[in-house]
Amino acid sequence: MHRFIAAATAGALVLLMSAAAFAAKKEAWSEIDVGKVSRTVADEYAVTIIAIDGDQSFRSRRVHELAPGFHLLHVASTKAGRRGEVTYQPFAIEMKPCTRYSLVAQHDSALGNRRWQVVVKDEKAIVSCVAEHMPAAPPAPPAPPAE
């Protein structure tokens, strides 16, 4: 009985250490934020992500975590038309590692919802990702002595 408990404890310890090592080796990531809209900018509306690289099987949320690189998003504006219709369009983006992109819909007119474009309103570093995956550059070597 004691051997079983010792083996189970050792197995659990190895599993926990493996999980911690796996969690620590998470790759750099990028984020899409779709919730920030300025009330002072005319014809600016929030957007909703409908598909990411053709995939629609994700939870609707304000921030989407993605791998860095090229992505094709299908984005809908939250501005509804006169009959309640919503429009969407494709949006291609090359995402840098450890960067959060805030997207909004910029409409051409206050009257309709057909003419608009997706705009990257803000681009910021993800502090926790930068700290983990982009260490500070080493200091420059000292300059040679002047002769």
Image: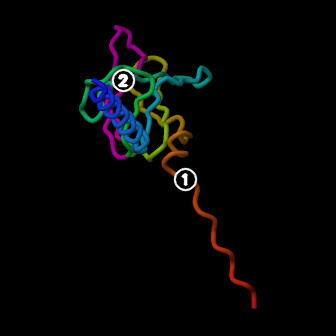
Number of on-image labels: 2
**Pick the front one: 58 or 28:** 28
The magenta stretch is 69-92
N-term mark: 1 or 2: 2
| Mark 1 vs 2: CB contact within 8 A | no
**81 within the magenta span:** yes
Mark 1 packing: few (<14 Cα in 10 Å), some, or many (20+)? Answer: few
In the picture shown, does residue 115 fall above or below 31? above
**Pick the front one: 50 or 43:** 50
**91 within the magenta span:** yes
Q: Which residue is mark 2?
A: 76
Name the quarter where the N terminus is drawn.
top left
Q: Which residue is mark 1?
A: 135
The answer to whether one can see residue 90 in this image is: no
Q: Position of residue 42 (x, y in %)?
A: 56, 23
* Disc number for residue 1: none
